[in-house]
Amino acid sequence: MSGTDFDAVIVGAGAAGLHCAAMAGQLGARVLLLDHAAKVAEKIRISGGGRCNFTNRDATPANFLSENPHFCRSALARYTPADFLALVDRHRIPWHEKHKGQLFCDRSAEDIIAMLLAECAAGGVERRQPCTVKAVRRAGESFELDTDSGTVRAARLVVATGGLSIPKIGASDFGLRLATQFGHRVVPTRPGLVPLTFDSADWAPFVPLAGVSLEVGIEAGRGKARGRFVEDLLFTHRGLSGPAVLQASNYWREGEPLRLDLAQGHDLADELLAAKQGSRRQLGTELAERLPRRLAEAWLAARPGWAARPLAEMKDAELRELAGRVQAWEITPDGSEGYRKAEVMLGGVDTRELNQQTLESRLAPGLHFIGEVVDVTGWLGGYNFQWAWASAAACARGLVAGLQGSGSGI
Ligand code: FDA
C-alpha cells in the first residue's frame, strides 16, 4: 500500500458497514470504519422489536423490489441466509424461527451487534465514532475524506450509510448526495414498510375499530409492480398498519387503492348462502363468526337494519353483494406515516451503474455502495438484513480482489 492511510474507508457502521468491514479486514485489508452516530448499528438494536429478525431462510430475489430486479441475484446467491446463520451459530447466539422463515434472536439484537463488533476486531478494523465526514474528493486513484478527526486517504471508499427512515437515530442522505457528487443517478426515494393513513373524514367510520386485528389478503400496485400478501392487518386511529399493510406499502403508489379480502380463507358468498337454508339466525351473528365482531358490526352499520335481519329473509343477491364487498374491499390511502415510522427507504442509488459482483461504481472506480442506500428493498421478514449482509460480503470480496489485483500488497 502506498500513499494511503487505509486500503478501505467504510462510511456507516450499521448492518452492511460492520459486516463489510469485518470481512474485508479478515481478508487482509486495512479498514477504517466511520459513523457519525455515537453508537453503532442503532437500527439493528431496535429491529424486530429488539430481537432482530436477522435473516429469512427463504430469501430469494423475488422478495426484493428494485427498478433493476435482477441486480440483487448475484450477491444473494453468493452469501446466503445459511452463510449468515453459520456465523450466528459460530458465535453461539441462540435464535428461533418465528414464521415464514423469519429468524430472530432468542435474547436480544445486542447479540448480533456484539458478534459484528467481535468480527471487526478479529479483522483489525479501526473504528471512529462519532465522526462526521465533511467532504470527499478524488486524490489520483484514491479517495480523500475530510473528517472531524482529520483527513484520511484510502484506495477504496464504501458507502454504507443506509436509508432515510427514522432520522432521529442517525439516518442521513449522505450516501445519496455522495452518489450524485460522483455522477450517479438516484432512483426517487419514498418510505417503505410503513403504515398507511387516510383522510380523516373518510376514516371517521373506522376510528372505533382502532386496535382490531385480523388476517387478511391484501394487494397493492399494478402489473409487474404488484404485491399480494396474506398477513395480519391492524386498524389504527389514523389508518391501517400491521404486517399486511407494511408489506403492501412497498407496492403502493399515491392515488392508488389497496384491495383487501377481510374474510381471508372463506368463500363468504357460498358460506352465507349455504347458512341461509332454514336458518333463523341474524345476519350480524352469522358475519361475526367469520370476521372480528367489531368489524362485522361496523360493516353492517352502513346498512341500517341489516344486522338484525334473519339470514333466511335476505335475498341471494344481497348476500352476494355484501360478501363481494367484504372480500374485495377497495380503499385508497391518503398517504403514509412517512420516514418517522417507515422501516426502510425504497429507491436509492441506481443499480444499473453498479457492478453486481462487487457493488462497485461503474462511473467512479474504487467507490462502492452497499445495503439500503442502494435501490434494492426487501419485504418485511428479515430480507432487508439479508441484503445488507449479502451486499456487504460481495463488496468485501470484490474490493479485496481489486486491491490484490492492483498490487497494493495485501
Ligand atoms: P443502517 O441504517 O443499518 O446503517 C447505516 C449507518 O450509517 C448508521 O449507523 C448511521 O448512523 C450511519 N450514517 C448515516 N449517515 C451517516 C453519515 N452522514 N456519516 C456517517 N455515518 C452515517 N430489517 C430486517 O431485515 N429485519 C428486521 O427485523 C428489521 N427491523 C427493523 C425495525 C425498524 C424500526 C427499522 C427502522 C428497520 C428495520 N429493518 C429490519 C430494516 C433494517 O434495519 C435496514 O434495512 C438495515 O439496517 C440496513 O442496513 P444498512 O447498513 O444499509 O443501514
Image: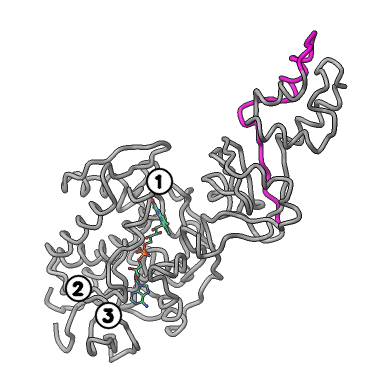
Between the residue at mark 2 and the residue at mark 1, the CA separation in whole angstroms equals 31 Å
Q: Position of residue 120 (x, y in %)?
A: 17, 64
Residue type at numbered disc 3: Cys
Q: Which residues are magenta?
A: 256-281
The disc at residue 131 is: 3
* Residue topped by disc 2: 127
* Label 2 vs 1, first from the N-terminus: 1
Q: Left or right of 197: which side holds 276? A: right
The quarter of the picture where the C terminus appears is: bottom left
Residue shown at 69% from the left, 25% from the top: 267
The residue lying toward the viewer, choosing from 73 and 330, is 330
Compare marks 1 and 3 and give the one earlier in the sequence.
Answer: 1
Residue 44, compared with residue 399, is above or below; it is above
Residue 227 in the figure: left or right of residue 91: right
Residue occupying the far front of the picture: 208
Inspect the image, locate mark 2, and give the three-letter code of the amino acid beneath it: Arg
10 Å neighbourhood of mark 2: few (<14), some, or many (≥20)? many
Which amino acid type corresponds to the residue marked 1 in the rendered image?
Answer: Ala
